[in-house]
Image: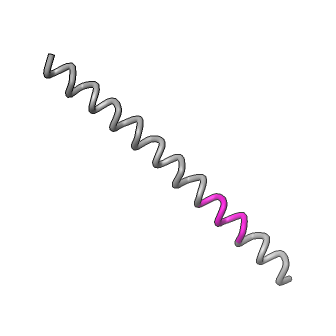
Amino acid sequence: MAEEDHLAAAERFEVGLGEARQRHRDRALDLLAVDLVTLANIE
């Protein structure tokens, strides 16, 4: 049973890590979009 608990915890960690990576990518894309709009407005 302890091994199953460890596997379940590892799976939850992997899912959480994937979600954090997705949020990081989304934020990076948001910042890139802001930079591109700013650059377009300058020129």
Which residue sits furthest left? 2
Count of all numbered marks drawn on residues in the image: 0
20 lies left or right of 7: right
3 lies left or right of 25: left
Residue 34: x and y, percent?
72, 68
Residue 27: x and y, percent?
59, 58
Up/down of 35 relative to 3, above or below: below
Residue 6, magenta (yes or no): no
16 lies left or right of 32: left
Residue at position x 28%, y 25% from top? Answer: 8
What is the image's colouring? one colour
> What secondary structure do most residues of the magenta stretch adopt?
helix
What's the magenta region? 28-34
Residue at position x 86%, y 82% from top? Answer: 43
Quarter of the rendering containing residue 10: top left
Which residue sits furthest bottom? 42
Up/down of 12 relative to 22, above or below: above
Up/down of 42 relative to 27, above or below: below
Q: Nearer the viewer, residue 23 or 29?
A: 23
Residue at position x 27%, y 31% from top? Answer: 9
Residue at position x 64%, y 66% from top? Answer: 31
Quarter of the rendering containing residue 16: top left
13 lies left or right of 5: right
Q: From the image, which quarter does the N terminus lie in?
A: top left
